[in-house]
Image (cartoon, rainbow, N blue to C red):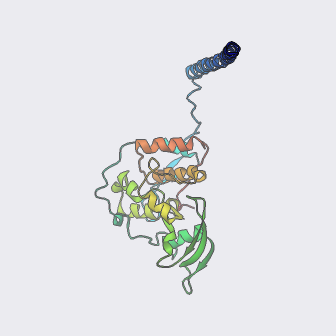
Amino acid sequence: MARHAQVFRSQRSARQRHGRAPVRSAVVLALIVLVVLAGWLHSSGRWPFEANAGPPPKLTALPPAQGKPLVAVGPGTALALLETLEVKGKASGSDYQRSAFGEAWEDADANGCDTRNDVLRRDLQDVRYAENAPCLVASGLLAEPYTGTTVEFRRGKDSSGAVQIDHVVALGNAWRTGAAALTAVQRQSLANDPLNLMAVDGPANEEKSDGDAATWLPPAKKIRCHYVARQISVKAAYRLWVAPAEKAAMVRVLGLCPQQESLPSGYLP
């Protein structure tokens, strides 16, 4: 009986070894095919794959003026616009002060309402205004872009912070990538340009802080292409540069959406 059991086990082991052999052979063959294919793609210039960014957008320098960008960016992809930006390390931020960008939420476009309320009015739904104050947004609903949730805005000491206005290119980052060399008026324009401002979830904005694309991206992945395109467009409009890690992160994001368009300054018609 024991002899029969031993024979049975030996036969079963043989069958298992015989069954594994074709699987191993198939795996080895597949690996060889992949290596050969990768070598052919690389030698023929077809790999690594690079998205076609298209021609660079037209860039037009503008005369200095309050409420105007330095450069008008023509139509084109964000990837192509990114290639027009200078790439170098960040400058020191030890001398950065928020006041270098002017008083917060001025009426930069001279429409009679401060910038914060302009952005709230633009980005919120079901907007209601404070009594006898046509510019002052009292409440509304935000289809929040960074988290993909809906956030209620209600003006008040303990409730206004639920919705904050984010500088898409954080002012601290802007200072370290060229804004320190701008004039006070140009920095004021940058800080209040609607292109660089979005109403967002307060905690998400605080988590971002002064981060760039290399250190922080919105949790909601569907907004990332637009978000990065917006950052690139702001940097182009105000002649800011990108750090190497920042550019690499932007390229990775836009690799999934190579035809994402750049955006013009919010000051331009």
> Tag count in the figure?
0
210 w.r.t. 48: above or below: below
**Residue 251 x %, y %:** 51, 41
Q: Quadrant of the C terminus?
A: bottom right
What residue is drawn where x is 35% and y is 44%?
Answer: 89
Q: Nearer the viewer, residue 139 or 191?
A: 139
Inspect this view and state whether residue 6 appears. yes
**Residue 178 x %, y %:** 37, 52
Which residue is outermost to the bottom? 132
On the image, which quarter does residue 243 sit in?
top left
Is 244 positioned to the left or the right of 123 in the image?
Answer: left
242 w.r.t. 193: above or below: above
Q: Quadrant of the N terminus?
A: top right
What residue is drawn where x is 57% and y is 24%?
Answer: 45
Which residue is outermost to the left? 95
What residue is drawn where x is 58% and y is 20%?
Answer: 35
Is 187 positioned to the left or the right of 41 in the image?
Answer: left
Q: Nearer the viewer, residue 151 or 198?
A: 151
**Residue 224 x %, y %:** 56, 51
Inspect this view and state whether residue 84 appears. no
Q: Nearer the viewer, residue 84 or 2?
A: 2
**Residue 208 x %, y %:** 45, 57
